[in-house]
Structures are given as C-alpha cells and as structure tokens.
Image (cartoon, helix red, strand yellow):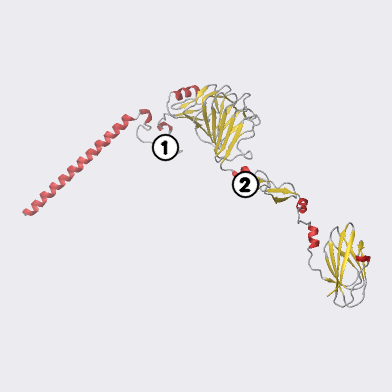
Amino acid sequence: MKSFKNDFLKDNLLRSYIDTKILSETNARISENLNLISQISSKINLSEKGALSGVATLGPDGILVSSQRPLSGNVFVFRPGETSPSGNVYSSWSSLITAVAGKSGLKFIQFDDSLQTVTIPVDNVNFSDCILLPRFKKQTPLAVTFTSGFLISAWPLEVQSLSLKFSSHFFDNLGSNILTLVDSSLEYSGSGNGIDFSTGSLSVFLKNSSVISNTKIIFALQSRSLNLVAFSGLCTIETNCITGNTSSILNITNLGANFAFGTSFVGTQIQFLGTRNNQDFTHVLERTLTSKGQILTRDASGNFVSFAPGFDNEILIYDSTTLSGFKSSSIGYLFSLPGMKSISDYVRQSSPSTQLLTAGSKTLDCSVSNLFRITGGNANITLSNLTENQIVNVIFESTGSLYSLSWLGGTFLWSGAIIPTPTQTVSRKDFYSFIKVGGLIFSSCILNMG
C-alpha cells in the first residue's frame, strides 16, 4: 500500500513538471511570434504591405490583384490615355520623368500601349541608370515614337523589345557611350544626321536587333570611331547609314549573330571613307562561301579560302602558284599540256583487239579504231576518216591462196613507190602501217610474218 502511494505521487509530480515546461515553451513562442509581427509591421511602409488584412488574393489571370500589389520604387509605367493614373503608372511624360529623376539607382521605364499608341513629346532626357522595356512583352517590339526635336542626353543601360522611332537629330556623341539593343530596333527617318560625333566613340551592342535607316544618315562619325557588336539572333545595320572621313574608324565584331548582307550584319557604307575592321569568330563558312559552286580550301597560312570553278564547261586544275592551289581552265588547255591527248586521239590509239574480218573489199573507219585484222583475199581497202598524224595498222592473214590488194582513201606513198605483194603462204601474216602527214598517207609493210 505504501509503495503504490509513492508511485502515484511520483507520477503526479512528473506530469506537473512536463505541463509546466510545455506551457512555458508555448508562451515563449507566442511572444516571439507577436514580437516578429510587430517588428515587420514597423519596418515595412504601409504603402508596401500589399494586403492589409494579411491575405493575398489572385485575380483570374493568376496574378496578384492590382489593389494588393506593393508599389515598386524603381519601376515607372508610361501609359498614354490613362484617365486615372495611380501609383507608379503615369499618363503624363513630364510627370514620369520627374519621378524618374527623383529616384536613385537602377530604374525601369515601362511603356504601355494598351490604351493608345506611345508617342513621346519633345524633351531632352537623361536615360542613364534606366532600362527601357514594354509593360507587357509582345510578339513584335512595341513602337515608341519620339516627336521631332526630341533629344537624348544619355543612353539607357539597355533597350528591350522596343522599336524606337526618331524623325530628327536625336543624339550628340560626347565621350565614350554605349547603346544596347535587345530584341529591339532603332529607326530613323529624319533629314539631317541622326547622331553627330563631336568627341569620343560610340559602341552599339545588338542582340537580335537592327538599325533601320530608311536611306538616311544615322551615324556621322567625322573623325571619330564607331563600334558595332552583334551577339545573337538576326542583327542588321542597314546600308549607307554611316559616314566618316579618312580618319574615322568603324569596328565590326560578330560574336554569333546571323546576318542578311552576305558576309556581315553591316551593309555597304559607300560614304564611309575611314578604316573598316571586320571580325567574325563564328561564321567562317558563311563568310568564305558566298556564291554557288565555290570550293572551300586552305591557303599556305592555313586560313580558309574559297575558289570559284569559273565558267561553264571549264575544268579544275591543281596549281601550287595560286592562293587556293587551284585554277580553272578550258578543256582545250588541258589537252595542250605535254602528254595529254584528245578524246578522239585516245580512242583511236587505245582501241581493243579487233575481231578477224572476212575477206573482201572493206571500208575501214579510222575514227573508231586504229587496228584492223582481215582475212587474206582479193579486195579494195578504203581508209576513211584518217586524221592528220593518226597511225592505223592493218593485218592481213593469208589462207594459202594468191590474192591482190588495192588501197583507196587518199594518196598512198610506198617504199620504192611499189605496193607490196601479199604473202601467199598459209597462216602467214602481213603487217601494214599507215600515218597521214601533210595530207599524204605514208605506208609501210612487213611481209610474211610467222
């Protein structure tokens, strides 16, 4: 009985101890949570808290409803036509620029054409520390039209998915400047120069972007330098939009972009009189092979070079004295080389063994063969199509009977001016050889071969 009582007291004491510890931990956690909520509330401005009740609500588009979105301090939206602008949305360009100027650090200026097209009034704006982009990205760049007279005093850090349209001179280059276009275009349609270079240089970085000149001058370098660098996508600097005197420098670098002007993303600039430097590290084949039928090879220094075969029906000949190691020439030139023969000469001088022909008169076509074998017997033998310097051989094989031959087809010259008498002995052979020289047929014969 005493033992049971002691166990009961110990259990109650242990249970009481555990309950006290749990209550203490619970109160501590509640206190810390309340303290954390108090600190967060004091550190976040009321305008940036979003949902005041603490519950966020998503709209049908899956995005936080506009009334609960905290205002961002460095994003400025220009929405022309907005009748009730609020927060970071501006319908007045001057109000937006004032707000941008009052904010330090990186800033985003977003253009929204959901109500009307975006047209920027005459102004002189410093876009340094700014990135220009559309409010919502579209399939094609959003058009931003700058009213004639608009000036840029400093380029933005980057232009994304916009089509910037200028109709008058818009920038004076002083010092070293950089313009970066990403999925964008810069278009100029003014009468004067779009950009005048007073001092320094300008670097234009393109990523799937283009500069459209409409046959106007955009870059007037004077004696300054322009660096054009293409990174990716299809990049284009249109033809005849760059001018410069003999002291100006145009550096063109392609680091992986595609192009539409044969071997470069920059078109021909006939009014640029300075030094043009081209570098392309990724398009060796495109820059080397530019027309149909070209052959790719290497020069003596190991560089890739191309060679055009030439005109129709010409042939390719190896020539160690040329840059590519090849040259093209006519077939006639090939056959004039030492040891070369025409096709007809080759055929006539390389005929296979001729089958033994029967006795009797024959016309031997020398254009198809240069060797004939004939059974002995009385016959008139005519040589046809025998060409100058061609050699034809005729073999008569005797059957053992006496016979005579007459030779026709030209003027035949024989040794001693006597036509040989064919051999009568059976199985013996007479070997006749003819060559045409100066229109005459020089003839010889070896009789009674056996």
Q: What residue sits 80% from the left and 59% below the top?
A: 345
Q: Quadrant of residue 411?
A: bottom right
Three-letter amino acid code at the position of disc 2 = Ala
Q: Quadrant of residue 200?
A: top right
Q: What residue sits 84% from the left and 58% below the top?
A: 389
Whether residue 345 appears in this view of the structure is: yes
Q: Quadrant of the C terminus?
A: bottom right
What SS does tag 1 mark?
A: loop
Name the side, left or right, on which 87 lies relative to 390.
left
Whether residue 234 appears in this view of the structure is: no
Q: Quadrant of residue 51?
A: top left
Tag 2: Cα neighbours inside 10 Å, few (<14), some, or many (≥20)?
few
- State if disc 1 and disc 2 touch (CB < 8 Å): no
* Distance (Cα) linking label 2 and label 1: 68 Å
x, y percent for residue 103: 43, 25
Q: Nearer the viewer, mark 2 or mark 1?
A: 2
x, y percent for residue 124: 52, 22
x, y percent for residue 207: 54, 37
Residue at the disc numbered 2: 300
- Specify which label sits upstream in the sequence, 2 or 1: 1
Q: How many marks?
A: 2
Question: In the image shown, does 177 or 30 lie closer to the viewer?
Answer: 177
Tag 1: Cα neighbours inside 10 Å, few (<14), some, or many (≥20)?
few
Q: Quadrant of the N terminus?
A: bottom left
What SS does tag 2 mark?
A: loop
Three-letter amino acid code at the position of disc 1 = Leu
Q: Check residue 17 in the rendering and tell me which mark sits there, or answer none.
A: none
Question: In the image shown, does 124 or 64 lie closer to the viewer?
Answer: 124
Residue at the disc numbered 1: 58
Name the side, left or right, on which 313 lies relative to 249.
right
Q: Is residue 198 above or below residue 60?
A: above
